[in-house]
Image (cartoon, helix red, strand yellow):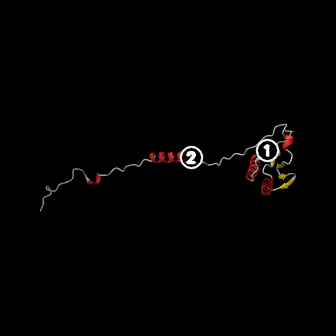
C-alpha cells in the first residue's frame, strides 16, 4: 500500500479554483446595428416624388386661352366641373373623354378659400393622370 506521504496533493485547493467568466460586451453589437440603421435610412426612398407642371397664362393671352377651357372648382363641399357637382372619379373620367376628343384641352383649376392643399393636389394629380397637358391654377381676384 501506499503511504499518505507518497500521495501527491495539488499545490492549490480544488475548491478555490474557479474560472473567470468572460463578459460579453454589447457595445460592438450596438455599433453595428446603428451603422446598419443609418445605411438603410440613407439608401431607402420613403416618398415617391412627382411633379405637376402648372402654367400661368399672361394677362394678354388670358382671354384668348379661356375659350373652350374647362373650369374645375375645388370647394370645401366638393368638386364642380363647369358649374355642376361631380366626384373625383367622375371628374377624371369626364376629363379623360374630353382630352381624347381634343388633346390640347385647357383645364383651369380654381380652389376655394379654406380648401386643404392635399385636396387640391389630389385633384391636380387626377387631372394629370387623365392626360391633361394644359393645366392652369387660377384664384379669385378679391384675394
Does residue 107 sit above or below 94 in this rendering?
above
Which mark is drawn over residue 32? none
Q: Earlier in the sequence, mark 1 or mark 2?
A: 2
Element class at badge 1: strand
Residue 67 drawn at (x, y percent): 86, 46
Residue 39 drawn at (x, y percent): 53, 46
Does residue 102 sit above or below 53 in this rendering?
below
Quadrant of residue 56 within the rendered picture:
top right
Q: CA distance from mark 1 to mark 2?
A: 37 Å
Number of other residues with Cα within 10 Å of mark 1, as a class: few under 14, some 14 to 19, many 20 or more: some
Disc 2 target residue: 41
Q: Left or right: where does residue 69 sit relative to residue 45?
A: right
User: From this viewpoint, which residue is outermost toward the top?
Assistant: 59
Residue at the spot x=80%, y=47% of the render?
Answer: 115
Residue 25 drawn at (x, y percent): 43, 47
Q: Left or right: where does residue 90 sit relative to residue 34?
A: right
The answer to whether residue 58 of the structure is visible from this angle is: yes
Of the two numbered discs 1 and 2 in the rendering, the one whose residue sits closer to the viewer: 1
User: From this viewpoint, which residue is outermost toward the bottom?
Assistant: 1
The answer to whether residue 88 of the structure is visible from this angle is: no
Number of other residues with Cα within 10 Å of mark 2, as a class: few under 14, some 14 to 19, many 20 or more: few
Which mark is drawn over residue 136? 1
Residue at the spot x=26%, y=54% of the render?
Answer: 14
Element class at badge 2: helix
Quarter of the N terminus within the rendering:
bottom left
Q: Nearer the viewer, residue 63 or 53?
A: 63
Q: Nearer the viewer, residue 134 or 42?
A: 134
Amino acid at each position: 500500500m501506499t503511504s499518505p506521504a507518497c500521495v501527491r496533493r495539488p499545490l492549490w485547493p480544488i475548491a478555490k479554483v474557479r474560472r473567470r467568466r468572460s463578459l460579453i460586451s454589447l457595445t460592438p453589437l450596438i455599433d453595428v446595428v446603428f451603422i446598419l440603421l443609418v445605411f438603410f435610412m440613407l439608401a431607402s426612398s420613403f416618398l415617391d416624388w412627382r411633379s405637376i407642371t402648372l402654367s400661368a397664362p399672361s394677362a394678354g393671352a388670358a382671354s384668348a386661352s379661356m375659350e373652350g377651357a374647362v373650369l374645375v372648382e375645388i370647394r370645401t363641399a366638393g368638386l364642380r366641373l363647369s358649374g355642376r357637382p361631380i366626384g373625383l372619379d367622375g371628374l377624371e373620367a369626364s376629363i379623360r373623354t374630353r382630352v381624347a376628343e381634343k388633346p390640347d384641352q385647357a383645364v383651369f383649376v380654381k380652389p376655394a378659400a379654406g380648401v386643404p392643399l392635399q385636396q387640391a393636389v389630389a385633384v391636380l394629380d387626377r387631372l394629370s393622370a387623365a392626360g391633361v397637358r394644359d393645366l392652369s391654377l387660377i384664384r379669385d381676384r378679391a384675394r
